[in-house]
Amino acid sequence: MALLFSAFRIGVTSWDAGERRVIETNNLVIVQNFLRSRISSAQPVFDDFSDDEKQFSFIGTENSLQFVSSLPARNGLQKFTLVFDEDKERKLKISVEPFFPTFDGDDSVKNEVILFEAIKQMDLSYFGSSSFGEEANWQNDWEDREYLPDLIKLDLRFHDKPEQSWPPFLVRFRVDSNQS
């Protein structure tokens, strides 16, 4: 009876571990598909209606990415901000808000979601030329430019689950705003 109970318990534990692994893998795939579809449809537009200086909609650093894209559940263009928050929980967060200002100034239309926690490292890099006529290469940031890069690469590693990996993630834009 003890052997039967032990075998049953081992089976249940293995089943639970397998289910957790499937859920984690599905979450990775869902987040990757969402990011790929939104980033690839980024629009090369300017924010020339704010009080600040006119600014291009795409801004990328090693730990953050801001872009404008559509979202089927909402009307109009949305500003997406993907940020690796290096606090003690080390989270990957995304916020979504309307790109164009709302008439009533309502800030409740901004949503923020934590995509993952316990991230060891996140690196964003951008492939493109720094200016017209230069050879394209990988760069750590994409700031103060008025066109989209050719490609974006996102490398994500988890701290507490080294066996859980983020599959290779490269995104190419559907719209080409490069002036070269």
Image (spheres, grey):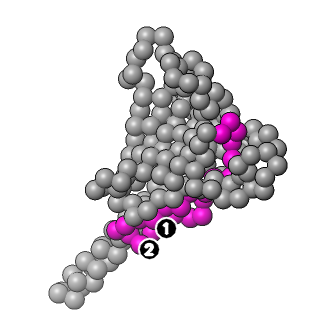
Q: Which residue is mark 2?
A: 163
Residue 76: x and y in percent read 59, 23
Name the residue rendered at 18%, 86% in the picture.
Answer: 1
* Closer to the camera in the image, 167 or 80: 80
Q: Is residue 72 above or below residue 128?
A: above
Queried whether the magenta region covers residue 157, the answer comes back as yes
Q: Which residues are magenta?
A: 145-169
Q: Is residue 174 above or below residue 159?
A: above
Q: Is residue 15 left or right of residue 39?
A: left
Residue 57: x and y in percent read 60, 33
Name the residue rendered at 39%, 22% in the picture.
Answer: 107
Numbered disc 2: secondary structure:
loop
Mark 1 and mark 2: span between their CA atoms?
Answer: 6 Å
Name the residue rendered at 53%, 61% in the picture.
Answer: 155
* Closer to the camera in the image, 166 or 49: 49
Q: Which residue is mark 1?
A: 165
Dominant secondary structure, magenta: loop
Residue 31 seen in the current view: no
Name the residue rendered at 35%, 60% in the picture.
Answer: 118
